[in-house]
């Protein structure tokens, strides 16, 4: 009797097999001629070679479905195990959804400019996304990063921002380093929580597959095989921005987001973001996109608040 061993990769067994192994039992019904045993992340199947080949192909398709959509049920098992490869490919090709988030939430570009941002990231290894608060710059970036990780285009996600509100010197804050940093990294955690199951997110952070750290911690590192997002980049100095951009290693994607109208640096300090946009605007392989008020996807009052403040502020 032939044996086939398949391992669940980056999948929580409890969620995949279902409550009281309900999903596993549903899978077994489609292959009565095979003996199928699952324990933790390992599945073993015994039977004729030809049936095992077909089972493995379809089972791997089911794993891909779970990795992409974060869920399976009896209907999904039926559809995936009975559909052919062409049908599965067609579904993927017509799908402009970036990530299937928690609770079936569909995460995709919400405005034409956000879609342009997605297209720019696909074409370029370094992209600057400039725009006011609420335009979905960071959220779209994190979705692209999660998509790249799920599709194994990169091995890790690195999210960073300058902790300028704390003067990049966090010594006066209470607690250990994680506790000190978390308030400044919260928007990045919020986006990730929309896109990854809690157990998966915690596991990725523990294993260093997802790293969230202040910009100062990037010094001296080479960031390769990674999707790296620098958020709130308007609060970088010349030296910080240059240091960050030169960390880029092999097979890396860099995305830099910020709003030049929200600089929190000391007076007379030039924003590294403003400078970088001027210096790099004609460099091939670097994309720059400007999002505006029409891209604001928060409460409708946010646009009015931004307009009101803009009318009284003297923007540099």
Image (cartoon, rainbow, N blue to C red):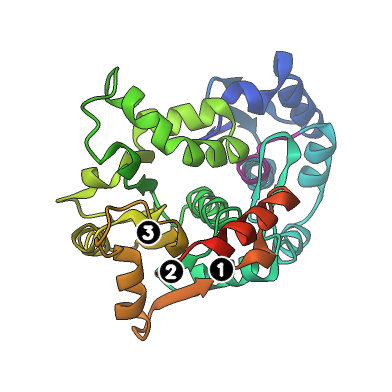
Q: Residue furthest top?
A: 20
Q: What x and y, as percent, mark residue 69?
A: 68, 43
From which residue to which does the magenta span run? Answer: 64-72
- Magenta segment main secondary structure: helix
> Which of the two discs, 2 and 1, labels the residue nearer the N terminus?
1
Sequence-wise first label, 1 or 3: 1
Say few, some or many: other residues with alpha carbon within 10 Å of mark 2 (under 14 / 14 to 19 / 20 or more). many
Q: CA distance from mark 1 to mark 3?
A: 18 Å
Q: Which residue is mark 2?
A: 127
Q: Nearer the viewer, residue 76 or 263?
A: 263
Q: Are marks 3 and 2 in contact (CB under 8 Å)?
A: no
**Residue 163 point in image, percent of width and height:** 32, 42
Q: Which residue is mark 3?
A: 234
Q: Is mark 2 in CB contact (under 8 Å) with mark 1?
A: yes
Residue at horizontal 56 percent and vertical 68 percent from the top: 117
| Tag 1 secondary structure | helix
Residue at mark 2 to residue at mark 1: CA–CA distance: 8 Å
Q: At x 75% / y 31%, what residue is drawn?
A: 27
Label 1 sits on residue: 117
| Magenta highlight on residue 124 | no
Identity of the residue drawn at 53% across and 64% down:
131
């Amino acid at each position: 009797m032939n044996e086939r061993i398949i391992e669940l990769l980056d999948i929580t067994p409890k969620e995949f097999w279902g409550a009281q192994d309900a999903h596993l039992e549903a899978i077994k019904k489609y292959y009565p001629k095979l003996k199928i045993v699952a324990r933790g992340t390992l599945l073993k199947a015994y039977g004729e070679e030809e049936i095992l080949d077909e089972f493995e192909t379809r089972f791997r398709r089911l794993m891909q479905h779970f990795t992409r959509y974060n869920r399976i049920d009896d209907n999904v098992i039926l559809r995936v195990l009975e559909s052919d490869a062409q049908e599965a490919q067609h579904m993927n090709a017509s799908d402009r959804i970036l990530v299937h988030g928690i609770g079936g939430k569909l995460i995709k570009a919400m405005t034409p400019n956000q879609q342009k941002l997605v297209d720019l990231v696909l074409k370029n290894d370094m992209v600057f996304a400039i725009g006011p608060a609420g335009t979905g710059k960071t959220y779209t970036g994190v979705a692209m990063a999660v998509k790249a990780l799920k599709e194994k285009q990169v091995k890790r996600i690195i999210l960073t921002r300058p902790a300028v509100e704390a003067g990049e010197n966090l010594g006066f804050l209470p607690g250990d380093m994680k506790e000190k940093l978390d308030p400044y990294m919260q928007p990045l955690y919020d986006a990730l929580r929309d896109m990854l199951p809690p157990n998966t997110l915690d596991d990725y952070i523990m294993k260093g597959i997802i790293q969230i750290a202040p910009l100062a911690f990037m010094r001296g590192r080479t960031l390769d095989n990674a999707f790296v997002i620098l958020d709130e980049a308007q609060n970088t100095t010349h030296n910080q921005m240059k240091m960050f951009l030169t960390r880029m290693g092999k097979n890396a994607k860099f995305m830099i987001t910020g709003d030049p109208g929200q600089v929190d640096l000391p007076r007379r300090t030039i924003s590294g973001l403003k400078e970088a946009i001027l210096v790099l605007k004609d460099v091939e392989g670097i994309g720059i996109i400007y999002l505006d008020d029409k891209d604001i996807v928060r409460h409708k009052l946010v646009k009015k608040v931004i307009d009101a403040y803009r009318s009284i502020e003297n923007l540099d």
